[in-house]
Image (cartoon, rainbow, N blue to C red):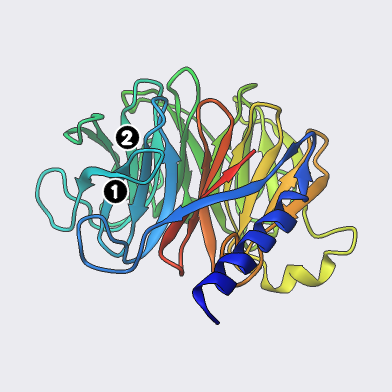
């Protein structure tokens, strides 16, 4: 297929995808950046993504064991962490979050700890150790920070959520293994919206669990209803984020798409499909909305790129 034909196909696909609105907004593919490689700005295994209050984009790359820093247009700005055992390095990073002041938190399964970096990339704190007591972790996974700076961590092998202060002091924990209300089979990502409702994706349970800030179970949302039941077999729910209107976006790594829930927990739209063209995904995982609520950024993991969608 020639270059003009590829761009025409991409434009047509983008137009079709723009028609799948979420609530009153419409998700529109806008741009993508990134490629596989060992250069400083290249990706090996991009996995998670967060947009900082200033609008910068941080991408956690599990292959390079670091966090890559970009502006909103994809211009490379620097690196946090890196492989190794020394101060400020990362051993087996899994997720990241950005606090109200621009500080970057990273869960590191290799040391069963949380590492906090300044916006300039300097390691300023480290919390946690292996174990099941308060403040200890077994394979920490997803992490989120609310508007007050409190930190929520998925404590993977302990099947719980831990809530901590910005300084790492333990506040509360909740959850257990199972399929009942407030339980998890494999909690992956966590998000706290503007109303401080806590959302957790359970990739094996194929649902989103909801909690109050204190850990009270509020019920679950399931995307595989209303004609989508056949998608459950291949599903692997991952990144989760909300926009300014209260819609919730959830990445489905296995089905190569993003779902949009309304405030009542109903899937009102989905976008993306398998592929490597404009607006197509191969294993989307992390996602984040910019501070103005105008753009959704998605890590397109296997395609080794970041996609930006207009909302």
Label tally: 2
In this picture, is 258 found above or below 303?
above
Image location of residue 280, percent across then percent down: 60, 64
Q: Image point 54% across, 70% down: which residue?
A: 4
Q: Nearer the viewer, residue 77 or 261?
A: 77
> Residue visible at 17% across and 49% down?
89
The residue lying furthest to the left in this view is 86
Q: Nearer the viewer, residue 196 or 67?
A: 67
The residue at 47%/55% (across/down) is: 32
Q: In the rendered image, which quarter contains the C terminus? A: top right
Name, please, the residue furthest toward the top.
Answer: 148
297, above or below 302, in the image: above
* Left or right: 30 as drawn, with respect to 28: left
Q: Is residue 80 visible?
A: yes
Residue pictured at 86% horizontal, 58% vertical = 225
Please state, as top left, top right, bottom left or bottom right, where the N terminus lies in the image. Answer: bottom right
Q: Residue 236, percent across and down?
A: 61, 64
Query: Mark 2 sits on what residue?
Result: 104
- Image side of residue 227 versus residue 137, left or right: right
- Which quadrant of the figure has residue 206? bottom right
Q: Nearer the viewer, residue 115 or 169?
A: 115
């Amino acid at each position: 297929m020639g270059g003009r034909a590829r761009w025409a196909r991409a434009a047509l696909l983008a137009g079709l995808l723009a028609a799948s609105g979420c609530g009153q907004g419409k998700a529109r593919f806008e741009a993508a950046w990134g490629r596989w490689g060992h250069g400083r700005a290249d990706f090996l295994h991009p996995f998670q993504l967060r947009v900082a209050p200033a609008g910068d984009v941080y991408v956690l790359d599990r292959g390079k064991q670091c966090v890559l820093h970009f502006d909103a247009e994809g211009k490379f700005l620097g690196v946090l962490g890196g492989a190794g055992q020394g101060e400020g390095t990362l051993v087996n990073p899994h997720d990241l979050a950005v606090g109200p002041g621009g500080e970057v938190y990273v869960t590191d399964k290799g040391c069963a700890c949380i590492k906090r970096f300044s916006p300039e990339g300097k390691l300023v704190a480290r919390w946690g150790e292996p174990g099941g007591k308060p403040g200890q972790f077994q394979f920490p996974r997803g992490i989120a920070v609310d508007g007050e700076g409190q930190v929520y961590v998925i404590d993977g092998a302990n099947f719980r959520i831990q809530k901590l202060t910005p300084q790492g002091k333990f506040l509360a924990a909740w959850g257990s293994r199972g399929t009942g209300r407030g339980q998890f089979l494999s909690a992956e990502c966590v998000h706290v919206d503007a109303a401080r409702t806590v959302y957790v994706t359970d990739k094996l349970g194929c649902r989103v669990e909801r909690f109050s800030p204190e850990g009270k179970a509020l019920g679950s949302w399931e995307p595989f209803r209303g004609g989508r039941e056949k998608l459950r077999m291949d599903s692997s729910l991952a990144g989760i984020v909300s926009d300014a209107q209260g819609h919730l976006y959830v990445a489905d790594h296995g089905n190569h798409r993003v779902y949009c829930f309304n405030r009542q927990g109903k899937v009102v739209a989905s976008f993306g499909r398998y592929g490597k063209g404009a607006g197509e995904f191969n294993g989307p995982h992390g996602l984040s909305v910019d501070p103005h609520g105008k753009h959704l950024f998605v890590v397109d993991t296997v395609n080794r790129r970041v996609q930006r969608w207009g909302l």
